[in-house]
């Protein structure tokens, strides 16, 4: 999408330097725009772990590039052992988004299958690029299918469609378009009046900092709100649709997403408001049935809750929010049970949050 009128993806190979992968450093947005260079597997691990890049699809593609970088730095003789260790290391960076393991496993399988190929490095880079292009296509299709939901609401309401979203499931969480934001961008570009309630999404404020930034750059009307505001807005008829992303959705429709998503789903159900999760097929865990029991929920550092960072006008600074000795719990995600999910918006269409409906869209996954 665009930043100051210039089109960007979130990750790319540096021009004229195939040994360097470049990403937007999302730790600095919206205050500064900086590019972060990845040249090694350690750089890749750091970028995912420290959320230089974040968002399930982008984490996956970044790890795919990481496997390419590993190949560049590996001697042929111990290729399989080295790449298996690399795969395990990159998978350990963040546990919840299934895209990470999915992408790494795909790349590992490809490289080992092609390891005698004299063009292995070039072929691997082409595989990463095709992976990236596929994710862009998925995001745009999610936008097209999600647009139909917004159009139906607009047709009845004949007034601005108010959409609440949580965290950042935007193009900054993907490569382009986003997942939850893709339908919003499609509707906006089609001239449908939309307004977005942007949950700030403590503790890292991906909504306040990233989603608000994206929507502002695209010219989409939005209002940043404290996380606890959504229920009140829903009770007073100010929300027509809740649209969120996902980091891992089970084949039965349980949706893992940023902490606080479950509470929005409860409030939406209590107020009869449709609650959709938007996700590409790379975010489904086809072998998992019980999200609440099985999805690993990442716990992150206490400083993310104990402190907050902002812009002084010249630089980013952190300040402490709580007493020095107060203990902190920092859960990164929660699981919304399928029963609270109105539907899932995928690159193949919209389905109910149940195994039968999901597998009807993805019949090739039935045998898993
Ligand atoms: C399109 S995936 C976006 C998903 O990822 C975010 O988590 P994080 O910023 O910690 O990577 C959040 O759960 C978003 O909904």
Image (tube, grey):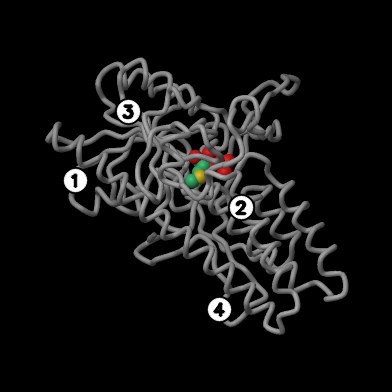
Quarter of the picture holding the N terminus: bottom left
Q: Is residue 264 left or right of residue 289?
A: left
Q: Quadrant of residue 345?
A: top left
Which is nearer the eye, 179 or 170? 179
Badge 2 is on which residue? 52
Q: CA distance from mark 2 to mark 1?
A: 33 Å
Tell me whether circle 2 and circle 4 mark residues in contact (CB < 8 Å): no
For numbered disc 4, what is the local secondary structure? loop
Label 4 or label 1, whichever comes before in sequence order:
4
For numbered disc 3, what is the local secondary structure? loop
Q: Position of residue 163 (x, y in %)?
A: 31, 34
Residue in the image at 20% along x and 37% along y? 152
Q: Quadrant of residue 76?
A: bottom right
Query: Looking at this rendering, what residue extends furthest in the right direction?
Result: 77
Badge 3 is on which residue? 274
Q: Residues within 10 Å of mark 4 (few under 14, many from 20)?
A: few
Q: Check residue 192 in the rendering and tell me which mark sits there, or answer none.
A: 1
Label 1 or label 3, whichever comes before in sequence order:
1
């Amino acid at each position: 999408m665009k930043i100051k009128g210039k089109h960007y993806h979130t990750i790319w190979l540096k021009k004229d330097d195939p040994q360097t992968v470049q990403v937007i450093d999302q730790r600095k947005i919206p205050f500064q725009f900086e590019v972060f260079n990845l040249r090694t597997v350690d750089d890749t691990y750091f970028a995912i772990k420290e959320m230089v890049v974040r968002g399930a699809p982008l984490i996956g593609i970044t790890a795919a590039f990481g496997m390419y970088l590993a190949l560049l730095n590996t001697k042929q003789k111990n290729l399989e052992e080295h790449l298996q260790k690399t795969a395990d290391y990159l998978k350990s960076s963040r546990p919840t988004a299934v895209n990470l393991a999915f992408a790494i496993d795909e790349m590992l399988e490809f490289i080992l299958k092609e390891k005698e190929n004299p063009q292995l490095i070039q072929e691997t880079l082409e595989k990463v690029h095709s992976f990236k292009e596929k994710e862009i296509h998925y995001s745009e299709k999610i936008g097209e299918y999600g647009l139909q939901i917004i159009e139906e609401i607009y047709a009845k309401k004949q007034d601005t469609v108010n959409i609440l979203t949580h965290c950042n499931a935007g193009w900054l969480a993907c490569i382009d378009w986003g997942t939850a934001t893709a339908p919003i961008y499609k509707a906006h570009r089609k001239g449908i009046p939309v307004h977005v309630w942007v949950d700030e999404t403590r503790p890292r404020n991906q909504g306040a900092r990233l989603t608000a930034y994206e929507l502002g750059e695209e010219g989409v009307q939005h209002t940043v709100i404290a996380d606890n505001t959504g229920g009140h807005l829903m009770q007073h008829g100010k929300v027509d649709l809740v649209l969120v992303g996902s980091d891992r959705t089970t084949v039965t429709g349980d949706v893992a997403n940023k902490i606080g998503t479950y509470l929005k789903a409860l409030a939406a159900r209590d107020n009869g408001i449709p609650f959709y999760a938007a996700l590409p097929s790379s975010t489904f865990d086809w072998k998992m049935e019980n999200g609440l029991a099985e999805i690993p929920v990442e716990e992150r550092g206490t400083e993310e809750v104990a402190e907050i960072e902002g812009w002084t006008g010249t630089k980013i600074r952190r300040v402490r929010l709580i007493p020095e000795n107060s203990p902190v719990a920092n859960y990164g995600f929660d699981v919304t049970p399928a029963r609270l999910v109105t539907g899932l918006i995928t690159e193949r269409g919209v389905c109910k949050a149940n195994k039968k409906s999901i597998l009807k869209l993805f019949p090739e996954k039935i045998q898993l």
